[in-house]
Image: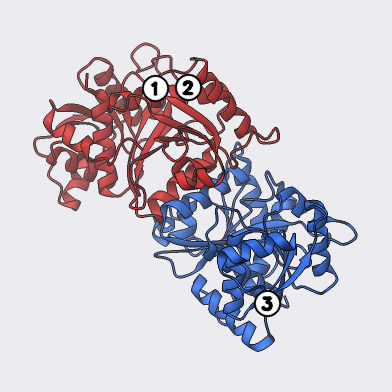
Amino acid sequence: MQLKNLDFLLEKCKSAPRMTLAVACPQGDDILEAVVDAAREGVVDPVLVGNRSRSEAIAEELGLDLSGIAFVDEPNDALAAEKAVKMVSSGEAHLLMKGNVKTAVLLKAVLNKEWGLRSGSLLSHLFLFQVPRMPGVIGMSDGGMTMYPDLPTKVGIVENAVWAYHRIGVECPKIAALAAVEVVNPDMQATLDAAALAQMNRRGQIKGCLIDGPLALDNAVSAEAARIKGIDSPVAGEADMLLVPSIEAGNFVGKVMMYMSGGKGAGVILGARRPIVLTSRFDNAETKRLSIAFGAVLSMS
Amino acid sequence: MEQLRSLTALLDYAKRIGAEKGPRKVAIALAEDAGVLEAIEAARKEGFAFGILVGNGDKIKAEADKAGIDLANYEVVDERRGEAQVGLTAVQLVSSGKADIFMKGMIHTNYFLKALLNKEIGLRTGKTISHCYFHEVKGYDRIFFIADAAFNMYPDLKTKADILANTVGLARSFGVECPKAAVLAAVEVVNPDMPATLDAAAITQMNRRGQIKNCLVDGPFALDNAVSEESARHKGIVSEVAGKADILLVPNIDAGNMMVKALVYFSENKTAGLILGASAPVVLTSRSDTIEAKTLSIAAAVALSVFKG
């Protein structure tokens, strides 16, 4: 846990030149609230691309002030997604945010071969969590872009995360490949993949990080639990990021942190040429602001 | 009985059972460990458990001395023929009726389970054996029962139904008369590409058709819809279980284990666990569990041992 808290994301946004955020389809109360908040706090300069009249109606209802925020009126969702993506791929904006548009519609635009944001990497979701009981920030990936990743996909997920950690100043993130147990069990695929990832890291096939696994979650985040189990590992008890084996596992861990442990966090989609901010309508305001800031910091050159 | 809404209430309930019916007898396989002895000593002092300590008598004595525990309050069964035999000797105390609860001490889990499942002197009933963690979490007015995050690795539909039935029994022994069970997945809609959602739908229907009784089941749910009424309302989910779940049925050991450990390490909580489905309650704790967690597990075994179904 080399990062002690997430506030540096906001500080960096406020002190560095402002990044421009293209929001595809902002016409949703939670999205507009988040974007207006981020603009007011000086986190980013938003450009809203979507249904202007509906956005203005929602803003009026919620008492949100849209004055001074650039707006490109495009009532059609697919076309709004296209325009927002093109703003980012042309360099007019620095990063993208998913608004009130179906994920599939937005990703289709992102992955367009001519004007999209493809980079050749797979897309993955990285979430950084901060919970009161933990001494530092814990990342988790993949947050559900791939439901049941195989080994090569897990390698891609790790590479995306390592890129992001390097951008936020963590030179060698410690990554725990999680399973239900800390020993290799031929009947448990997650433990086999974890062992393979650890060895690939040792052989230099995955660079810029320190991977160990399989680790159970307790061994990954608690040095005491690792000690009791007799696990000798530089990652145990100090993990910066948890690599989860399935969408269910990631979902449960994330929701325990956000709903049952008083947590906050910051999440983005990685692997496109520019980061994509993705918030859930249930994220609290701070998490939404931090997610936008996380995307903005990753976009800085 | 009144519904137990916290693990402190569970402890009080176990004390009441001890006062009314006398302490339950706990056979501990390989009791050569100060931590295990401290847990049973705490339960003894509360009046709800009496320990029968199986293992090398000299080593048990040494560990008891280390923990400042007087063995005059215990029965020691000196068994030095190896871990496999320690397991069998301890389990036979339970199957023969000399003890009420089977508990793992320092014995390796494999030997413990072999003894538990032994066809002649074990505690098999033909039912599926499953594990249940139960948690008290700050901010919630009830105990969460999570199954199976430890024993059945990748249960199929039938096994999930059995796990649920075992867990319902435990919840009912805690006074939750008709527990609400949420079958968890990553999403709350049925998705043909996500097997957990299909199983959840099937288990829900099995409950509606009376194939799974004494509980109210709904699923699939994402964890937030199961525990937060507000989140369920936002998603437009109409369900008597949404936001009010007592039981969280997880799809596999990976997801369940990570969820339980996230609760233990990230939230403000108390946690304990039991093995269910055997002919007597079985306490299987991990070395890294706190003494409090071990004592709470014994208290739960005591509650289950007097439950008549």
Badge 2 crowding class, 10 Å Cα cut-off, few under 14, some 14 to 19, many 20 or more, is some
> What residue is drawn where x is 35% and y is 54%?
A262
- Chain letter, disc 2 residue: A
How far apart marks 3 and 1 lie (CA) works out to: 66 Å
**Relative depth, front residue between A91 and A242:** A242
Q: Where A288 falls versus B290 (above or below)?
A: above
The residue wearing badge 2 is A156
Q: Where A29 falls versus B212 (above or below)?
A: above
Indicate the colour of chain A: red
Residue B20: image location, x then y, percent:
65, 88
Image quadrant where residue B173 sits: bottom right
Q: Which mark is residue B72?
A: 3
B152 relative to B8 in the view: left or right: right
User: What amino acid type is highlighted by mark number 2?
Assistant: Gly
Indicate the colour of chain B: blue
| Tag 2 secondary structure | helix
The residue wearing badge 1 is A271
- Chain letter, disc 3 residue: B
Q: Where A259 falls versus A233 (above or below)?
A: below
**Relative depth, front residue between B225 and A201:** A201
